[in-house]
Amino acid sequence: ALWHLTGVVLMEQLHAGERAMDAFRQTLVADPGHVDAFLRLRLLYDEHGEHEALTDLLERRLDVERDPGERMALHRAIAELARNFLEDRERAKVHYRALVEAAPRDGRAVAALSDIAWEQGDWPAAAETLRRRAQLETDPSTLKHIHFRLGMIYAERLPDLPEAMQWF
């Protein structure tokens, strides 16, 4: 409780973000489920651009968070940080997969997985996730692009001309 109080004073009264982060980290060592310390540390890491530390904090929060909606939000935040700021595609895939496992119709997560597979040249995974994405997509323009990408995979990467023609 004293670490938390110290962090609050450092953050709000003294505007000493670096020192407040230390206090909130100590709070979470003593009480990993402390919500306010977690939220304040998350905010401070974000403000300071501490993306790796923020990602680690969110992953540790997954260990204590039981609310399914909050867990989904944590997985999405970790995946997006890993992909967009840390360029850690493997870490991003783990968390996007957790989202798809919990919500199979999560189009954003499926789209991210298909894009990552495409970027990595993992053509079987790209084809599988693009197929899933095609089932979920309702926008005709996006669907056209997905079909074209699937056609390209089957024409050039996983040679299956009848399959390629079907997608084209």
Image (cartoon, rainbow, N blue to C red):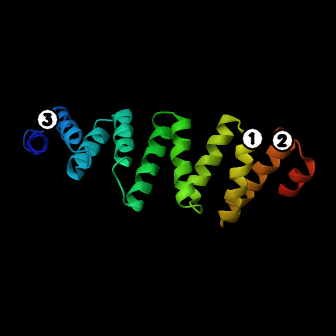
Residue at image mark 1: 123
Between discs 1 and 3, the one toward the N terminus: 3
Residue type, label 2:
Leu
Q: Residue at x 9, y 40 (%)?
A: 6
Tell me the distance, in whole angstroms, between the alpha carbons under discs 1 and 3: 49 Å
Kindly report which numbered mark, 1 or 3, lies closer to the viewer in this rendering.
Answer: 1
Viewer-side label of 2, 3: 2
* Residue tagged 2: 158
Question: Residue 132 or 148: which is nearer the viewer?
Answer: 132
Q: Residue at x 26, y 47 (%)?
A: 38
Q: Which mark is residue 16?
A: 3
Image position, residue 153 (x, y; %): 80, 44
Q: Residues within 10 Å of mark 2 (few under 14, many from 20)?
A: some
User: Circles 2 and 1: CB distance less than 8 Å?
Assistant: yes
Q: Nearer the viewer, residue 53 or 30?
A: 30
The amino acid type of the residue labelled 3 equals Ala
Q: Please, which residue is most extreme toward the right here?
A: 162
Q: Amino acid at mark 1?
A: Trp
User: Which element is circle 2 on?
Assistant: loop
Instruction: Tell me: residue 90, above or below residue 132.
Output: above
Give the structural element (helix, strand or loop) at label 3.
Answer: loop
